[in-house]
Image (cartoon, grey):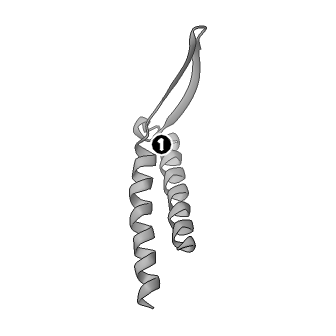
Amino acid sequence: MLKTVFVAFLSFILVSSLLLFIGYVFDITVFQFTFYEETEAGFVAGGSVIPFMLAIFVSYFVGNAYQRKRHSH
């Protein structure tokens, strides 16, 4: 069980990092996450959570596939 969680977490980190990297390299705003300060009244944080949502989706299926593979052997 712990290995399955580790594999799923690792896939989340890898997929989200890859999507964020692609967003910055190719200037795709849908895959970028930015944080910046704008006025004296406060700060403005902007960006997309789509890379993180896609990474959660992928890590769920990777974790399930790993667990099924582990139980079949």
Is 54 located above or below residue 65 in the figure? above
Q: Residue at x 44, y 54 (%)?
A: 55
15 and 67: which one is in front? 67
Q: Quadrant of the C terminus?
A: bottom left
**Within the image, what quadrant is residue 10 found in?**
bottom right
Amino acid under label 1?
A: Gly
Q: Is residue 42 above or below residue 4?
A: above
Provide residue 13's location: percent of width, then percent of height.
Answer: 55, 56
Q: Which residue is mark 1?
A: 23
Q: Residue at x 45, y 76 (%)?
A: 66
Picture residue at 51% right of the left edge, 36% below the top: 33
Residue 51 image point, x, y percent? 44, 46
Q: Specify the farthest residue to the front.
A: 1
Which residue is painted at 53% across and 68% down in the image? 7
Helix, strand or loop at label 1? It is helix
Characterize the local packing of mark 1: few (<14), some (14-19) or many (20 or more) Cα atoms within 10 angstroms.
some
Residue at the limit of the structure toward the bottom, as seen here: 73
How many numbered markers are drawn?
Answer: 1
Q: Is residue 26 left or right of residue 10?
A: left
Residue 20 in picture, x, y percent from top left: 51, 45
